Amino acid sequence: MIAVARDLVTLAAAADDFFEEGFQLPFALKVIAETEPEERAEAEEKMLPRRQYADGYYVWLNYLVWLDAVVEMQPQSLSVAELEGLRVLRTARNHFLRTHPSCHACGRPEEATVVRCRHCGAEIK
Ligand SMILES: [Zn+2]
């Protein structure tokens, strides 16, 4: 068994993927839904993000996202693994937000390299 909570290097890499996957998935699902049924399997193969790390990292990250929200509402006493996990999660989230600036029109994160927001079509400045 992999001790995902203690492997902070891999957890950090999985956290970067986790945020990117959450960002890309709605776009991929939209394209797949608009694809002709007979080509849908191929579209899924191409568009759906592939996870590079063991499922346990993503289970732990989902728990940390929940824990992060709970801690904000009411301070908790946390284990060392939880504290380290939250530090990794927040670092990955900050990195994601730096590389995906908010659209000035709709406020949603967008890739810094695109010309138009894929949510609302506003020009990215
Ligand atoms: Zn927008």
Image: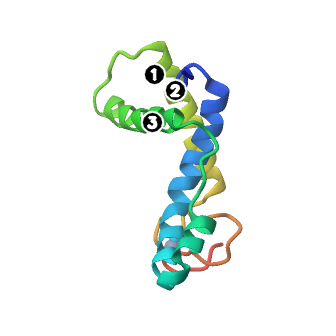
> Please, is residue 66 above or below residue 76 in the view?
below
Q: Nearer the viewer, residue 125 or 3?
A: 3
- Tell me, for residue 59, which label it has, or none: 3
- On the picture, is 75 further left or further right than 24? left
Q: Residue at x 45, y 36 (%)?
A: 59
How crowded pointer 3 is (Cα within 10 Å; few <14, some 14-19, many 20+) is rated as few
- Looking at the image, do the residues carrying marks 2 and 1 touch, with CB atoms under 8 Å apart? yes
Q: Nearer the viewer, mark 2 or mark 3?
A: 3
> Please, is residue 93 above or below residue 99 in the view?
above
Image spot of residue 73 (x, y percent): 29, 33
Q: Could one spot residue 104 in this view of the protein?
A: no
Type of amino acid at the residue the image marks with label 3 = Val
How crowded pointer 1 is (Cα within 10 Å; few <14, some 14-19, many 20+) is rated as some
- Closer to the chain start, of discs 3 and 1, is 3
Q: Secondary structure at mark 1?
A: helix
Residue beneath disc 1: 82
Image spot of residue 111 (x, y percent): 64, 64
- On the picture, is 1 further left or further right than 78? right
- Closer to the chain start, of discs 2 and 3, is 3
Q: Nearer the viewer, mark 3 or mark 1?
A: 3
Q: Nearer the viewer, residue 71 or 20?
A: 20
Image spot of residue 89 (x, y percent): 53, 35
Residue beneath disc 2: 85
Type of amino acid at the residue the image marks with label 1 = Glu
Q: Secondary structure at mark 2?
A: helix
- Tell me, for residue 14, which label it has, or none: none
Type of amino acid at the residue the image marks with label 2 = Gly
> Image quarter for residue 109?
bottom right
- Mark 1 within 8 Å of ligand 1, using the beta carbon: no
Q: Residue at x 45, y 21 (%)?
A: 82
